Image (cartoon, rainbow, N blue to C red):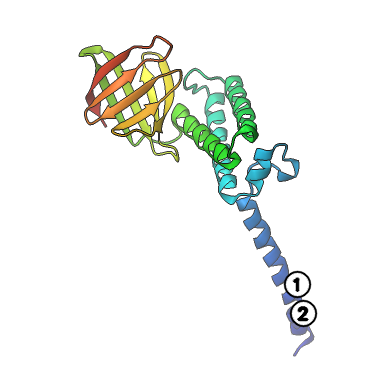
Amino acid sequence: MPLADRAIVRALPVAFSGALSLIASSAFADQSPSFDCARAASSAETLVCNDAELAKLDRELADHFAQALAAAKAGEAAGGQSVAELRAYQRGWIKGRDDCWKAQDLRECVEASYRMRDAELVATWMLEEPINTVTWVCDGDPANQVTTMFFDTDLPSVRFERGDSVDVGYLARTASGARYDGSFGRYIWIKGDEATYRDPGGEGEEYTCELAAEG
């Protein structure tokens, strides 16, 4: 065998080993969360670093937060949120996630926290196309309308639009129909082409609503 060919053969194991290392490193990066696990500062972060499914949720959330941040910087404020407000909400969410150490089931709490926040970002900032948009007329008054946009997020979610207000709700367990609970007592409980809608607040009113437009 020529000298040059022997040199190539000797180099092959080294090159192959390097390629394997590169592939392994890439695979590990694909399974890691968005933050540096060497700096994990809470039991929730430590759990995410050691749980592939939670790490995946973390990466997805980080991606959606980056999209929302870009939209806020571009002036596309959804729900009136500025860049500063969006960052503040995210810091508040992180604090809430880290408080899951108080929960009876840490993993269940952390997973629910990720799914809820991700759905909130998607629906608030319209990061995905809604799977359906429905306008409801309440108490027979065409001026009394609620628009609901439904999103196929991990935790099924809805965007409420009523007048100038925007809110996000999440699918709740019910014996019948589909109920989405929003902020401060707001909800919509859908049964076929009819729904019960409740405004937020301690004295929020309930309305009987009928489907007016869909699609």
* Position above or below: 208 against 45: above
Mark 2 lies on a secondary structure that is helix
Q: Position of residue 166 (x, y in %)?
A: 42, 20
Which residue is labeled 2 in the image? 10
Q: Position of residue 95 (x, y in %)?
A: 64, 28
* Residue in the picture at 75% in, 72% down: 14
Q: Hey, what amino acid is under mark 2?
A: Arg
Which residue is labeled 1 in the image? 14
* Residue in the picture at 54% in, 25% down: 72
Q: Hey, what amino acid is under mark 1?
A: Val
Does the CB distance between marks 1 and 2 fall below 8 Å?
Answer: yes
Q: Position of residue 197 (x, y in %)?
A: 32, 20
Residue situated in front as seen by the camera: 25 or 150: 150
Quarter occupied by the C terminus = top left
> Residue 181 occupies which quadrant of the picture?
top left
> Residue 123 occupies which quadrant of the picture?
top left
Q: Gap between marks 1 and 2, in whole Å? A: 8 Å
